[in-house]
Image (cartoon, helix red, strand yellow):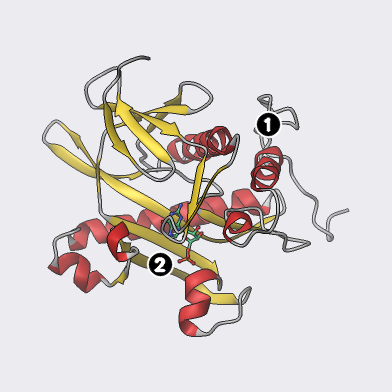
Amino acid sequence: MKNRRRIYEGKAKILYEGPEPGTLIQFFKDDATAFNKKKQDVIDGKGVLNNRISEFIFTHLNQIGLPTHFIKRVNMREQLIKEVDIVPLEVIVRNIAAGTLAKRLGLEEGAVLPRSIIEFCYKEDALDDPLVSEEHITAFGWASPQEIDDIMAMAIRVNDFLTGLFAGVGIQLVDFKIEFGRLFEGDQMRIVLADEISPDSCRLWDVKTQQKLDKDVFRRDLGSLTEAYQEVARRLGIMNENEAPRPSGPVLVKSDNDD
Ligand code: 5GP
């Protein structure tokens, strides 16, 4: 597709106009950034892996009736998506203490939280995406109380689905960030899951070794990011070592208790 109109360019993705009105093409870049662009690199193949992993997850979420912007993957780096108005919030779901929560509250990294916790950050790079409360969100009109309820209910469903999906392949879902958008259909509007879900936006630890299989590998210089993301894709049954598609689905990992 040549000369198509670029709608938006973010740190890891570009949005182009889509083939039909109301659609967009989401392009996954190889750029890796952390600490709000203070650390940057280009990691060969990251975009391809994130495109495949996010496709896999969004396809399953659509199948369980959770509304998303995802329509289909069109090639190695691109997806066809529905155009939505992004709600300017990063919705973070946490199961285990890590990252900024561990730092903010002085918790030991790896401690299991008493229950899953949802946090909201205002999406504004210039301010480093500050943590905000529901009071800020409604007072400044970023989302209505009903929309916050819908977002929280969907965030919990995504967490339940992802926790089970990753546990089945020997991976602990520590936390993740998701985004939502407003989808307009005729005179109806509803909140749908948008953006991506990939090792860029999740913390994923190997159950047995606690090895990190996510963007912390890049943030903390822990080794090869591509190898970590490939391992996630391989366990989910998306790609084999040669990155060829494999239709078999997740590779179940036997727990020590299984015979
Ligand atoms: P923390 O607040 O501990 O840095 O991040 C919590 C979770 O949200 C982690 O899984 C992290 O990867 C994800 N996250 C937080 N902010 C961003 C962001 O701006 N971009 C992406 N891709 N993920 C984020």
Q: Give the Cα distance between marks 2 and 1.
A: 31 Å
Q: What amino acid does circle 1 point to? A: Met
**Closer-to-camera residue (251/234):** 234
Task: Please state which of residues 242 and 8 is positioned toward the viewer in this rendering.
Answer: 8
Instruction: Pinpoint residue 58: horizontal percent, then vertical percent.
Output: 47, 38
| 13 or 243: nearer the viewer | 13
The image shows residue 185 at horizontal and vertical percentages of 19, 32
Q: Which residue is mark 2?
A: 118
Mark 2 element type: strand
Depicted 101 relative to depicted 16: above or below: below
Residue 18 drawn above or below residue 115: above
Answer left or right for 138 relative to 192. Answer: left
In x, y percent, where is residue 199?
Answer: 56, 49
Which quadrant of the figure has residue 3?
Answer: top left
User: Residue 102: where, in percent of width, then height?
Assistant: 53, 77
**Circle 1 is placed at which residue position?**
239
**Labels in figure, total:** 2
- Residue at the right extreme of this rendering: 259
Q: Residue 104, which numbered label? A: none
Specify the farthest residue to the left: 187
Q: At 33% across and 33% down in the image, what residue appears?
A: 15
